[in-house]
Image (tube, rainbow, N blue to C red):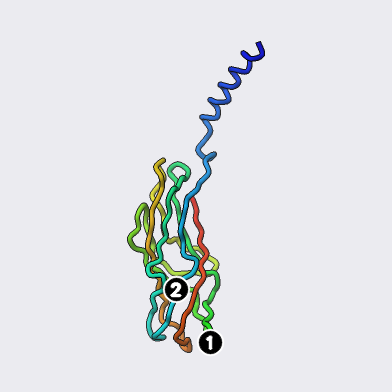
Amino acid sequence: MLKSLYRPLLLTAIFLTALLPSYAVQDKVNMTLPSTVTYTVTNVLSATTGAPAPSSITYSSGNLHWNAHLRISVMANAAVCTPPGGGPSIPAGSFSWTAANATGGVGYNGTLVYNAYTVVYQSNSWNGNALSGAVNLTWKMAAPPTGVRAGTYTISLTWRVDSV
């Protein structure tokens, strides 16, 4: 008798679980991002391309909420890039990127900002298939301020990945 009373409750619990909204699903994705960009300045009167050139951002095995987009943004870790051995600093706003060869979404050109994220890439909306894509970023440092010497400069990056 007791067993027959639990059967309807069990079926009701299974049915209600099947009706849970999509926000019960956790977003996840495997991603590769550069943590720094290095510039070898040989001519202080012209712009310098950063390395690696290009920097590739890739992601795969993505599962997001239904119809969501993967948005990737970046910011500089410091307001300035301090040169090795001292001398004038280079403002974060002197560093920019050009996006190319985006797959699975749209890449955006931009300029680094300290204390604010700038969108680099946004994926197509997730429709239940495995989410994957990539974008190549070519980094540039504008001609440095007066007094900056030739040498190697590295700027550290902080990335933000959102499901929107």
Give whichever of discs 2 and 1 has the lower sequence position.
1
For the residue pair 145 and 83, the one nearer the viewer reads as 83
Kind of residue at disc 1? Gly
Q: Is residue 18 above or below residue 9?
A: below
Residue 104 image position (x, y, % from top left): 36, 52
Query: How many marks overall?
Result: 2
Residue 13 image position (x, y, % from top left): 58, 25
**Quarter of the image containing the N terminus?**
top right
Helix, strand or loop at label 2? It is: strand
- Neighbourhood count class around disc 2 (C-alpha, 10 Å): few under 14, some 14–19, many 20 upward: many
Q: Is residue 29 above or below residue 120?
A: above
For the residue pair 21 and 103, the one nearer the viewer reads as 103
Q: Is residue 20 left or right of residue 122?
A: right
Q: Quadrant of residue 109?
A: bottom left
Residue 11 image position (x, y, % from top left): 56, 21
Q: Quadrant of residue 10?
A: top right
Q: Which residue is mark 1?
A: 87
For the residue pair 108 and 62, the one nearer the viewer reads as 62
View extreme (top): residue:
1
- Neighbourhood count class around disc 1 (C-alpha, 10 Å): few under 14, some 14–19, many 20 upward: few
Helix, strand or loop at label 1? It is: loop
Q: Which residue is mark 2?
A: 95
Q: Is residue 81 left or right of residue 59?
A: right
| Residue beneath the point at 55% across and 30% down | 17
View extreme (right): residue:
2
View extreme (left): residue:
101
- Estimate the spatial distance between the alpha carbons at disc 2 and disc 1, rounded to whole Å: 18 Å
Q: Is residue 150 above or below residue 23?
A: below
